Image (cartoon, rainbow, N blue to C red):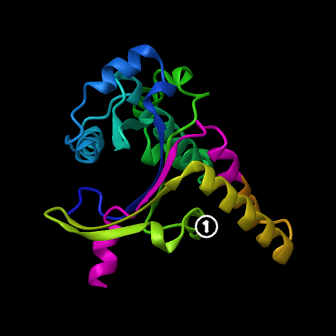
Amino acid sequence: MHSTPYVASLRVYEPINAFSPADQLRWSQIDIAYNTLIEEQNLALRRIINPESPALRPDGVHIRELDGVRYVCPWSTATRCWAGLERFKTSLPAPVILFFIPEALDEVLTAGIDIAENKVPHILTETWIVPPRWFSLFTPEERRWGSTDKGAFTILQTSIAKAKVRCESTHKAVRSAFGIGPVEEEIENLGEWLKMFHPQSIVELDYGGLADYLEHS
């Protein structure tokens, strides 16, 4: 069973040479067989029990190798944590937030926020669902599924060049059919996010533990 069973992830893997020499050296030494997904999940669970600023720990990466080229997807832990925290804060009245996130905990979580506030996350996540707009980036032929000792898996993978073309086509179709609105804006934002990365990147949709749920539902 997956550690975080109902989280789907959309990841961008950039060629390792798109990063700084220091990062290239550090990440090139990671064994391709090492399960970075489990490591990321375990660190996230430990952070729930013992809160710490995500900026205090060097960020990890997920790794893919294709045709002899290593691609890496930084976890973007700090950026994603702070973005999630801000979304939560804006969803409730300020006096109520203190019941969920005491001021002392808020200070721990936001320590070092200036380090990552301008960084673009390489991973987008959604709980309980796979957003329909994510499917627009792939074709059925790009889907792989099966089972391991960790449970069922479903993964879709394509080049970022193809993903951007498909996203733009979907955006035009939705805008033509329904006009400007929330759905059209979400697809447009997805396209803008993809433009932030190296043109030789790989885009991956991972159902995560939702694959287990779908298999047994």
Q: For the point 80% across and 66% down, which residue is it? A: 172
> What x and y, as percent, mark residue 164?
66, 53
> What x and y, as percent, mark residue 76?
45, 35
> What x and y, as percent, mark residue 73?
42, 39
Highlighted range, magenta: 189-217
Let me know if residue 115 is in the magenta part.
no
Report the side of 12 relative to 192 (left or right): left
Q: Is residue 57 visible?
A: no
Q: Quadrant of residue 83?
A: top right
Report the side of 8 relative to 46 (left or right): right
- Looking at the rendered structure, the kind of residue marked 1 is Ser
Q: Disc 1 marks which residue? A: 136
> What x and y, as percent, mark residue 132?
58, 70
Picture layout, residue 15 above or below residue 131 = above
Let me know if residue 192 is in the magenta part.
yes
Quadrant where the C terminus sits is bottom left
